[in-house]
């Protein structure tokens, strides 16, 4: 019989907040009268850094650019953050790989519904149809980022 290896840690949400929010609507009011379908580009990024001990700040960022005929109809930039406690107690030794996965997958999974709702509300309140982000595979994003930054731990 082999010993099981725990690949998750308890997560405590201490705080969630909008760190930065910007919405630009440069075509208003003329952009609302077109029947053209916009070209929407969505860039997602995740950052995490240690605050103190087992407490970390995780920031889920989304930059959304909508263009109609090569003219920007709107730009939305959102940085949504959470402060998370990882592990059972401060004296616990944490495996770096498991902590990274908790931060870049599990914590981001907690933040995502709030980011999705804020983006939907802002685009709707900006006069556009609400933009609802599709669910994201944060494990895949984490693995891609880990591969791209193989030597990097936290920043």
Image (tube, helix red, strand yellow):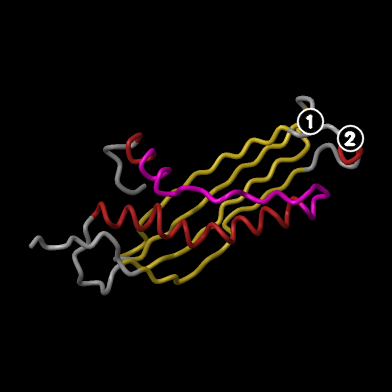
To which residue does mark 1 refer? Answer: 68
Residue 19 at x, y percent in the picture: 57, 57
Q: Quadrant of residue 75?
A: top right
Q: Please report the bounds of the magenta region as a residue range.
A: 124-144
Secondary structure beneath dot 2 equals loop
Q: Quadrant of residue 70?
A: top right
- 1 or 2: tag closer to the N-terminus: 2
Left or right, 147 with reference to 78 = left
Count neighbours of disc 1 (C-alpha within 10 A) and say few if under 14, some if 14 to 19, many if 20 or more. Answer: some
Q: CA distance from mark 1 to mark 2?
A: 9 Å
Secondary structure beneath dot 1 equals strand
Compared to residue 113, the image places residue 147 above or below, namely above
Residue 34 is marked as 2
Residue 12 at x, y percent in the picture: 39, 71
What residue is drawn where x is 41% and y is 43%?
Answer: 140
Q: Residue furthest top?
A: 70
């Amino acid at each position: 019989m082999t010993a099981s290896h725990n690949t998750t840690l308890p997560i405590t949400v201490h705080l969630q907040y909008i760190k930065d929010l910007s919405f630009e609507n440069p075509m208003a009011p003329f952009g609302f009268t077109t029947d053209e379908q916009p070209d929407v580009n969505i860039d997602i990024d995740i950052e995490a850094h240690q605050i103190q001990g087992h407490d970390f700040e995780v920031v889920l960022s989304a930059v959304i650019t909508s263009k109609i005929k090569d003219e920007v109809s709107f730009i939305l930039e959102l940085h949504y953050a959470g402060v998370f406690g990882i592990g059972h107690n401060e004296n616990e030794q944490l495996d770096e790989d498991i902590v990274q996965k908790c931060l870049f997958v599990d914590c981001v999974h907690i933040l995502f519904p709030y980011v999705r709702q804020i983006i939907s509300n802002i685009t709707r309140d900006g006069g556009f149809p609400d933009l609802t982000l599709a669910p994201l595979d944060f494990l895949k994003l984490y693995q891609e980022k880990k591969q791209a930054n193989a030597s990097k731990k936290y920043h």
